[in-house]
């Protein structure tokens, strides 16, 4: 609640609150601010105070006034280029549905207001409050605390090892011991790779970036799952790619839509989360996986399979890379979710004929990756510490998920997908963009459904983290504010 002080007026405090959210992407470009009267009611101040605060935001260039519509956060960049198949395709040929090659003006016509994907990323560094954050994509820090990680670092930091680390760049492909450990780990998932096919990276996102920069050029078409990881949409857009959103269903991607895209746009890459898909929690079925691989072979595109949540899933879960044998697939994963976000260790396993190209891209971007942390991680894997830690996390997550689901249902929500993995895809019944701003006032950062689409559109869905939504306090605040938004 705003309170007038000797050093700062209510107007200045309100302006600073909105400015902070805009600069930290908690209010995305194109987002509408509450109406003057609604904001005054929400913040417990006079209408004149809100008018003055909005005027200050205008003066700072953070918002713009649109006649008869209100105040909006200023757009700071062009929206992504997004293509979609016709809404009704049945009974018509591909040629009748859309031109085989779209003109520039046709592509531009599909451009809409973007989702600022960095909102939740910045939220990791910009602490909203000390409360558990339902919108975050990682486990709470206390879940990841271990004794074996410090021991691993001490183990590999003898005086001779430190001399080696400091006087050389290390191995371009990554620490050989870690790559051997990763090859064994992948074999347990039926993804058969030798160490020479594995390249380490600065986290899984960096691995995906290496893949994109190696295989794609500006203007190329890329298929991505929708809903999906907003950071991937934004990253591909920043590289100048044309984004083709493929609806994600319980069994896998919409194969009819993929086939249309292949016929019309000749995509070069498909980015997929097969296991515990973010945000739905869906897992790919064998039948769907085989058809996706058939399309890849028929239409000559690669698949980047992001297995970020592999440590939470059963080893027998269907993975495209296991069925394909790393021919048209590239396996990507990391350890930020399960072990050490700050270590930033990720990796990819690739077809042999792509390894040198991917390595060249890595060298141009980062030269090598931190050998000390890679050696420490290899020790954690070899000693079985990572496996035992993952088992403890899965057990704890199962209990948290059960509590969170029970609370969500008790507070009037439903699940758009069967609860599984780390995330829940929750139907709230209200515009979650509007709800997100109200929740921020209470110290909670939520992940509204619009964030998981390639273009902004109103959504009543939100993604929750089961590990951080198992307390009744959050759900009581959520229910009160949801009813106020209705």
Image (tube, rainbow, N blue to C red):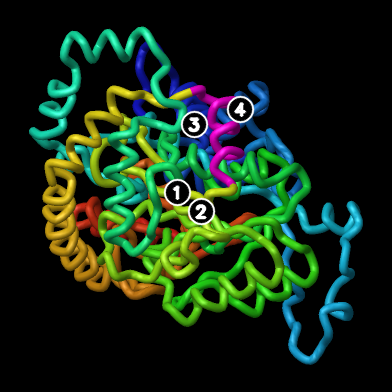
Q: Nearer the viewer, residue 219 or 210?
A: 210
Chain-order first, disc 4 or disc 2: 4
Chain-order first, disc 2 or disc 1: 2
Mark 4 Cα within 10 Å, few/some/many (few <14, many 20+)?
many
**What is the C-alpha distance between the residues marked 3 and 2?**
33 Å
- Residue located farthest toward the left when viewing the structure as drawn: 147
Chain-order first, disc 3 or disc 2: 3
Q: Nearer the viewer, residue 127 or 305?
A: 305
Which residue occupies 80% across, 69% down?
A: 264
Range covered by the magenta-colored residues: 354-367
**What is the C-alpha distance between the residues marked 2 and 1?**
6 Å
Which residue occupies 37% across, 30% down?
A: 125
Residue 228 x %, y %: 51, 58
Dot in front, 4 or 2: 2
| Mark number, residue 330 | 2
Q: Nearer the viewer, residue 419 or 413?
A: 419
Q: Which residue is mark 4?
A: 57
In what element is the residue under mark 4?
helix
Give the answer, above or below, for where 188 lies relative to 248: above
Q: Which residue is mark 3?
A: 24
**On-image quarter of the C terminus:** bottom left
Per the picture, the main secondary structure of the magenta-coloured stretch is helix
Q: Would you say the residues marked 3 and 2 are in contact, meaning their CB atoms lie under 8 Å apart?
A: no
Q: Would you say the residues marked 3 and 1 are in contact, meaning their CB atoms lie under 8 Å apart?
A: no
């Amino acid at each position: 609640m705003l309170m007038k002080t000797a050093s700062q007026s209510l107007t200045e405090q309100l302006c600073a609150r909105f400015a902070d959210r805009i600069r930290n992407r908690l209010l995305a470009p194109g987002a509408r601010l509450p109406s003057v009267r609604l904001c005054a009611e929400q913040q417990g101040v006079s209408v004149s105070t809100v008018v003055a605060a909005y005027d200050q935001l205008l003066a700072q260039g953070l918002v713009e006034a649109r006649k008869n519509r209100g105040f909006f956060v200023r757009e700071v960049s062009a929206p992504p280029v997004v293509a979609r198949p016709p809404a009704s395709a049945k009974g018509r040929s591909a040629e009748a549905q859309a031109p085989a090659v779209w003109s520039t003006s046709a592509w531009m016509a599909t451009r809409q207001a973007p989702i600022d994907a960095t909102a939740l990323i910045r939220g990791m560094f910009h602490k909203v409050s000390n409360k558990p954050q339902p919108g975050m994509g990682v486990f709470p820090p206390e879940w990841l605390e271990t004794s074996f990680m410090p021991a691993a670092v001490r183990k590999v930091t003898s005086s001779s090892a430190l001399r080696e680390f400091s006087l050389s760049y290390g191995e371009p492909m990554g620490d050989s011991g870690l790559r051997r450990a990763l090859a064994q780990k992948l074999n347990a998932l039926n993804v058969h790779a030798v160490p020479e096919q594995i390249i380490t990276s600065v986290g899984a996102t960096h691995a995906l970036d290496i893949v994109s920069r190696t295989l794609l050029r500006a203007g190329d078409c890329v298929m991505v799952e929708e809903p999906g990881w907003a950071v991937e949409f934004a990253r591909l857009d920043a590289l100048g790619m044309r984004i083709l959103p493929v609806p994600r269903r319980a069994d896998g991607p919409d194969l009819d839509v993929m086939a249309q895209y292949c016929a019309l746009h000749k995509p070069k890459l498909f980015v997929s989360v097969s296991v515990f898909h973010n945000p739905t929690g869906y897992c790919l079925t064998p039948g769907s996986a085989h058809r996706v691989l058939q399309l890849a072979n028929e239409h000559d595109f690669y698949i980047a399979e992001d297995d970020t949540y592999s440590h939470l899933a059963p080893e027998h879960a269907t993975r495209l890379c296991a069925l394909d044998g790393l021919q048209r697939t590239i396996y990507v994963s990391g350890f930020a979710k399960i072990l050490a976000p700050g270590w930033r260790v990720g990796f990819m396993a690739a077809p042999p004929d792509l390894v040198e190209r991917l390595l060249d891209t890595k060298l141009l971007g980062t030269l090598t990756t931190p050998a000390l942390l890679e050696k420490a991680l290899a020790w954690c894997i070899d000693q079985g510490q990572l496996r035992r830690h993952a088992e403890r996390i899965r057990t704890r997550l199962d209990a948290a998920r059960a509590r969170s689901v029970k609370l969500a249902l008790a507070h009037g929500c439903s699940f758009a997908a069967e609860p599984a993995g780390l995330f829940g895809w929750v139907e709230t019944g209200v515009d979650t963009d509007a709800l997100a701003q109200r929740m921020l006032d209470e110290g909670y950062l939520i992940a509204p459904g619009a964030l998981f689409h390639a273009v902004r559109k109103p959504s009543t869905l939100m993604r929750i983290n089961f590990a951080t939504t198992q307390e009744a306090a959050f759900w009581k605040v959520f229910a009160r504010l949801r009813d106020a938004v209705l």
